Image: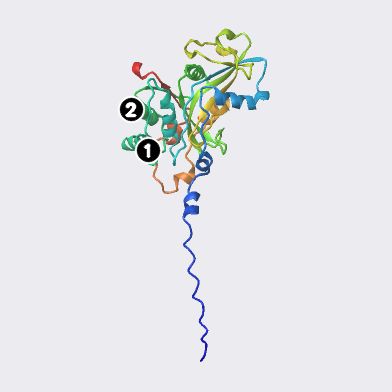
Amino acid sequence: MSVENVSSPPPPPPPPPSLAPSVSSKKKLYQALSEGRAPVEGDHEEARIIIGQRESSFRKDLQWLLFNKYVPSLIQDGPQCGLVALWMAAHLLHPPETLVMETLVQTAQHNAYTEQGEMFSAGDMAKLAEEVCGCRVQRLSGGMMGENTAVILKHLAGGQPALIPYDEDFNHEPCLRNGHKAHWAVVSGILLGLRQGCVDRKHFPPDVTLPWLHLSQNEASVSWPMDGIEEVFVLAKQGKSLRYQLWRFELLTQSNSQLTEMDPQRASDGTRYVVPPGGIQDGLAGQVLLLHTNTQMS
């Protein structure tokens, strides 16, 4: 009787490759970084942290006044920076307006303001904000300097938001790329450095941790001489980060003014976008939207 060698059965085929890597690879870095995190809430809380981290860069011979009204954060999905900025700003309306992003996108598409969520026209953005928020929108043109500076600062000191297009650097701060990195931010606050004696300190209690920093309590009654301002920063949020950022007003002004052309690579990638007849130079450059938040008086 012979013994037959029986070979062992072939090993089972390897399992199909997991889809998880390909799915996660589609996620933008800024989306991945924001997962599981929450924004710092409160009008002054995050601003004080930022200012404290940079304390040595602020001149102590000036009076520093902080104005801010907190806006919630939202991470954009695709080229929706302008719509996300509007969503954030709407929370400062009186009464507050909780917009649904999907409805916001659909309304913009229905009105032919956008294809993918992009907003390359400040004029269209103003009309959209008035339609969905029911508020009055003041569109400034000609840049952020000159007479517009006082208008913008008074608006922000009054606790009202501004939507401002600019070129976004890798760290989300303003840069100068001729519009190739055009992006929208909501600005909800300002930090002013004024010459000593310009403002009565009784109206501005000092911060507990940073006694040289004074916090605004009643925005409606605040005034100051424009020629007393030595330095200006803005508090801004945009759709690629949960965090506030503190930018020099001058840098944001420069970035806003030089939005002259759409990124050639984006313009030729085969994706449909809504671009105004004069391009983004006519649509965005030198323009700022001031949202007047009291909708009951608009």
The residue carrying mark 2 is 131
101 relative to 169 in the view: left or right? left
Bin the neighbour count of mark 2 within 10 Å (Cα to Cα): few under 14, some 14-19, many 20 and up. Answer: few
Q: Secondary structure at mark 2?
A: helix
Residue 143 appearing in the image: no
- Residue lying farthest front? 1
**Residue 297 location, x and y as percent?**
35, 16
For the point 34% across and 28% down, the residue is: 132
Q: Please tell me whether residue 165 is drawn above or below residue 221 in the rendered image.
A: below
Identify the colour scheme used.
rainbow
Disc number lying in front (2 or 1): 2
Could you tell whether 206 is left or right of 21 in the image? right
- Residue 29 seen anywhere in this rendered image of the structure: yes
The dot on residue 165 is: none
* Residue lying farthest to the bottom in this orientation: 1
**For the point 48% across and 53% down, which residue is it?**
20
Residue 242 drawn at (x, y percent): 51, 34
In the shown orientation, is residue 231 left or right of residue 280? right
User: Which residue occupies 31% across, 37% down?
Assistant: 110
How far apart in space, not on screen, are marks 2 and 1 (Cα)?
Answer: 15 Å
- As shown in the figure, which amino acid type bears the numbered disc 2? Glu
Residue designated by label 1:
114
